[in-house]
Amino acid sequence: MTLTLAQLRYLVAVADCRSITGAAASVFVAQSALSRAIQAMERDLGVELLARTSRGVNLTAEGVRVVRLARTVLDAMKAIEDIGVYRTGTARATLHLVTTPTLALDLAPDLVDAFAERNPGVEVRLHQCGSREALMKELGSGRAELGLVDLPVDKELSAHHLQEREVVLISPPGSRLPDPVPFRYLDGMSMVLPSPGTGRRTELEALFSSLGVRPVPTVESDERLAWVTGVADGRGSLIWYRDVVLRAFGRRVEVRSFTPPLLRPVGVVHTSRPLTRTGRAFLAHIRHNSPVREPIR
C-alpha cells in the first residue's frame, strides 16, 4: 500500500470544502479523478473515509483521523520546501492581508505578531477595509492574498475556520432585560444598526427575519463611533461581539448573552488562485494555533 501526497491533498480539500465538487475545484482536478483517488485510498486502507449522502459528504471517524494526520504530513512537506526562503536575508517576502475594522483591532494584531515572530523574513502588510464588500474586491483583484473575515463567505472563496466569537446584546444602563436574553425580546426593541443596504445590515435583517422579530432602528450608521455613542446615550441596543465591549464601551453599558447563545465563526479566506509560499505558511500557522475546527456538515 502506497498513499500519495496528491491523495492526501484531495482528502484534506474535501474536509475544507465540505463537498466533492468544491474540493475538485479547489485543487484544480476533475471531480471524477478526485473521487477515484479517495476511493483508492479507502480500498488501500480498508476503511471508509467519507460517508456520502444526498446532501454531500461527511467524514467518518476514521476519516477525521486520517485528515488530521494528512494535514501534519502536508504541512511538514511545505515547511521542508520553504526552508531558507524567509531567512536567507537576500529578499524579504511580503504577505498582503485584508480584514474588516473590528477584526483589525481585535484579532489581526495577535495573529500577525505571532506569525511574524516565527517568520522574521516575512513582512505582513495589513490593510483595513471599510466593509466585507470592499474586502472581497481586494481579494478578487489580487491586491490581497488572504482575508480575515466573518464566515460564511461566497462559495467562490476558500475558507479556513479560525475560531468562534460570541455575539451579544449591548444595551444602555438600566435596561430591564433578562440575562441571558431570549431572541423574542428583540421584537420592537430600539436598535443601533448598520446603514441600510450594506452587507452587515443585510445579514442582521436576515437574522431578524429568521427569528420573526422586527427591531426599531434608532441609529443607522456604519461608523463604529456612532454605534458606541448611540448605545451610551441611551438611544438603543446594539448587536456586537463580546470581546470588543470593554475596549469600546468600558463599563458604561450592559452586556447580555442570547439564549440560545449566538456564535459567529471567523476565518481566513482566499480565492482559487494558487497561494504563494507566504500565504501557505500563514495558513499553516493558523491551523496549528487555532481552536477546534468546525465539523463537516
Image (cartoon, rainbow, N blue to C red):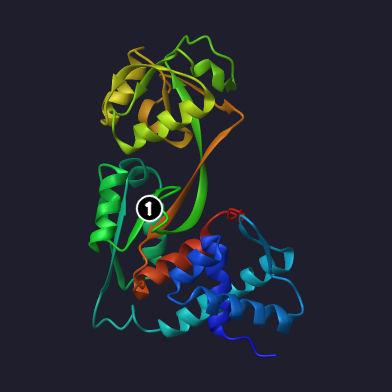
Q: Is residue 118 visible?
A: no
Q: Residues within 10 Å of mark 1 (few under 14, many from 20)?
A: many
Q: Which is more toward the observer, 190 or 209?
A: 209
Q: Is residue 237 visible?
A: yes
The residue under the point 35% across, 63% down is 271
Q: Residue 177's quadrant in the figure?
A: top right
Vertical placement of residue 97 versus 93, above or below: above
- Drawn side of residue 151 relative to residue 14, left or right: left
Vertical placement of residue 238 versus 1, above or below: above
Residue placed farthest to the bottom in the image?
1
Residue placed farthest to the right in the image?
46
- Drawn side of residue 273 relative to residue 143, left or right: right
Q: Which is more toward the observer, 69 or 233?
A: 69
Could you tell me residue 192's position as x and y percent?
Answer: 35, 21
Could you tell me residue 99's position as x and y percent?
Answer: 32, 50
Q: Residue 258's quadrant in the figure?
A: top right
Q: Which is more toward the observer, 244 or 130?
A: 130
The residue under the point 27% across, 24% down is 226
Could you tell me residue 41's position as x and y percent?
Answer: 66, 80
Which quadrant of the figure contains the N terminus?
bottom right
Q: Which is more toward the observer, 43 or 133?
A: 43
The residue under the point 45% across, 47% down is 151
| Circle 1 SS class | strand
Tell me which amino acid carries mark 1.
Leu
Q: Residue 237's quadrant in the figure?
A: top left
Could you tell me residue 57's position as x and y percent?
Answer: 62, 61
To which residue does mark 1 refer? 148
